[in-house]
Amino acid sequence: MSPYLPYTPADIARQAVDAARAGAAIVHLHARDPEDGRPTSSGKVYKEIVDRIRDQSDVIINITTSGPSDPAQRMEGAIECGAEMASLNMGTMSPMGRSSMGSKIKDFKFEWEKSFFTSDKEKIYRNTEGTIEAIARELGQRGTKLECECYDIGHLYNVAYFVAQGVLKLPVTIQTVFGFSGGIGVDPANVVHMRTIANQLFGDQWHWSILAAGKHQTRLCAMGAAMGANVRVGMEDNLYLRKGELAKSNAEQVAQMRQILELMSLEVSTAEDARQTLGLRAAKERP
């Protein structure tokens, strides 16, 4: 859907480093098979990406644990790289509408992309209690800070459940996600509602970040920032810089968001600032 989306280790690493130079304190990574761009959980591919980034930047590495059904596979990249952070989806979801989106695409770059779009009516993102617990316990023992991705109100209650069970520890880091199919919508009232429920559940023992899909990315991030949230932008969530103009890199979106935040008289954290805030490993403890 965009010729600018990176999929080789070298291109992903380059865009991550450029995003850090533009002001990102954390880079969130999804690895791709360098041959055909297919999503992969390969620890070897993640290691190549992360090594390239660490050679050039001290940015915080946040690796996804989404993907296959097997929790061990999903953790492979985070474990292989000794990631400081890893994302963790907090509930099972069934995406809606991807097949209709795919029908608008005339030319696919790779054959697998066509089936990815057309078969989605039976697709689920599987995040059961057992899967979440297995990932949280294993990575928690390894000192990896989990970013709890909450696509709906119920996911916040799932976080609270795992805190009560001793699987997750306070303070929790929560990424509230708006506008993705199967999850909560992009209404501004939903941003307020998510923050209200999280405050009720966790008091001052949580760190808030916000992301939103597509054209809503900038608007909801600015709203969240005004309410005290950290913000995430990037081409996983939105392919455009502005209406009708594809972003040529993740760094372009970071630079644009940084300008907006600074115009709002907000200061952008460095990676070391973020490490102290989130309680991440000290520099000497990182791989």
Image (cartoon, rainbow, N blue to C red):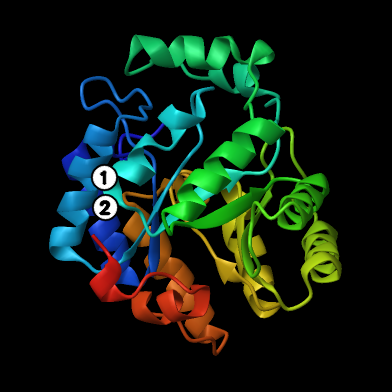
| Circle 2: element type | helix
Quarter of the figure that contains the C terminus: bottom left
- Does residue 161 appear left or right of residue 37 in this picture? right
* Of the pair 40 and 262, the residue shown nearer to us: 40
Quarter of the figure that contains the N terminus: top left
Q: Amino acid at mark 1?
A: Ile
Instruction: State the count of labels.
Output: 2
- The residue identified by callout 2 is 15
x and y, in percent, of residue 17 in the image: 24, 60
CB contact under 8 Å: marks 1 and 2: yes
The image's mark for residue 246 is none
Snapshot quadrant of residue 199: bottom right
* Of the pair 147 and 6, the residue shown nearer to us: 147
Q: Is residue 86 visible?
A: no
x and y, in percent, of residue 155 in the image: 75, 47
x and y, in percent, of residue 178 in the image: 69, 50
* Of the pair 143 and 95, the residue shown nearer to us: 143
- Does residue 84 appear left or right of residue 236 in this picture? left
User: Is the residue marked by circle 2 packed among few (<14), some (14-19), or many (20+) residues within 10 Å?
Assistant: many
| Circle 1: element type | helix
Residue ranking furthest to the bottom = 265
User: Is the residue marked by circle 1 packed among few (<14), some (14-19), or many (20+) residues within 10 Å?
Assistant: many
Residue ranking furthest to the left = 55
In the figure, 184 relative to 110: above or below?
below
Image point (16%, 51%), residue name: 52
Q: Label 1, label 2: how many angstroms apart (C-alpha)? A: 5 Å
- The residue identified by callout 1 is 12
Image point (63%, 26%), residue name: 126
Image point (50%, 79%), residue name: 277
Q: Is residue 175 visible?
A: yes
x and y, in percent, of residue 196 in the image: 84, 68
Q: Amino acid at mark 2?
A: Gln
